[in-house]
Image (cartoon, grey):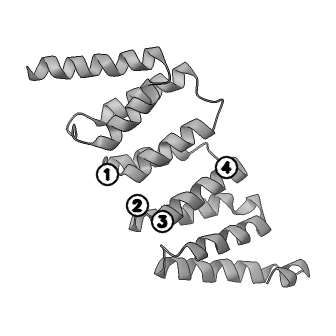
Amino acid sequence: LFTLADEGDAKVLEDELEYSSDVAASNPKNYQIWYHRRALVEKVGGALARPELTFISDQLVGDAKNYHAWSHRLWVLKTYDCWDRELQFIESLHEDDVYNNSAWNHRYSVVTLSGDGLTPAVAVREVDYALKWIPGAEENESAWVFATAFAKKDPAAFSRLLAFCESALANNA
């Protein structure tokens, strides 16, 4: 396959990517198809990064907890440095399902692996992000664990979480 592409038949890679899309749609939890897509994307290069993220998004709509799709998504983001729309994508998933633990885990990875690193301002921002989803879903362990993870990284972020908890306890007393 790659030999044909190296010999100038780029269409063979397009055909294979289309075929692998069909196979992935019918077998989304088969890890082999995701590794095959990785090899195809690597061969074609960064031009496929955005279309691949769109493909993965479509797969996650059908099953938001598909580990292989999330893993592949993180690989695309890291390899092609295309983090710029990812926080908005994750927020849209939380709008659909605030209990989506996979999206919470992915957000943690995106925040800690992208950008300028984990600054105090980022820790506060992420605690605030989690806290906005907790009212009405107080039993959502994923949001609490996410908030706690960032609160441990900065005193101001910790103070935000503590104030939220104290206020919630005072209102329920």
- Residue occupied by mark 4: 78
Q: Please give left or right for residue 130 compared with residue 107 in the image.
A: left
- Residue occupied by mark 3: 58
Residue displayed at 52% across by 64% down:
69
Type of amino acid under label 2:
Ala
Q: CA distance from mark 2 to mark 3?
A: 10 Å
Type of amino acid under label 3:
Asp
Residue displayed at 46% across by 29% down:
150
- Residue occupied by mark 2: 64
Q: CA distance from mark 4 to mark 1?
A: 25 Å
Towards the viewer: 72 or 62? 72
Tag 1 secondary structure: loop
- Residue occupied by mark 1: 97
When asked about the image quadrant of residue 54, the answer is: bottom right
**Mark 4 and mark 1 residues within 8 Å of each other at the beta carbon:** no
In the rendered image, residue 42, in percent from the top left (x then y), is placed at 75, 65
**Mark 1 and mark 3 residues within 8 Å of each other at the beta carbon:** no
Q: Earlier in the sequence, mark 4 or mark 2?
A: 2
Location of the N terminus by quadrant is bottom right
When asked about the image quadrant of residue 60, the answer is: bottom left
In the rendered image, residue 142, in percent from the top left (x then y), is placed at 34, 43
Q: Earlier in the sequence, mark 4 or mark 1?
A: 4
Q: Please give left or right for residue 77 compared with residue 57 in the image.
A: right
Q: CA distance from mark 1 to mark 3?
A: 16 Å
In the rendered image, residue 171, in percent from the top left (x then y), is placed at 12, 20
Point out the frontmost of discs 1 and 3.
Answer: 1
**Mark 2 and mark 3 residues within 8 Å of each other at the beta carbon:** no
The crowding category of the residue bearing disc 1, from other C-alpha atoms within 10 Å (few below 14, some 14 to 19, many at least 20), is: few
Q: CA distance from mark 4 to mark 2?
A: 20 Å
Q: Earlier in the sequence, mark 4 or mark 3?
A: 3
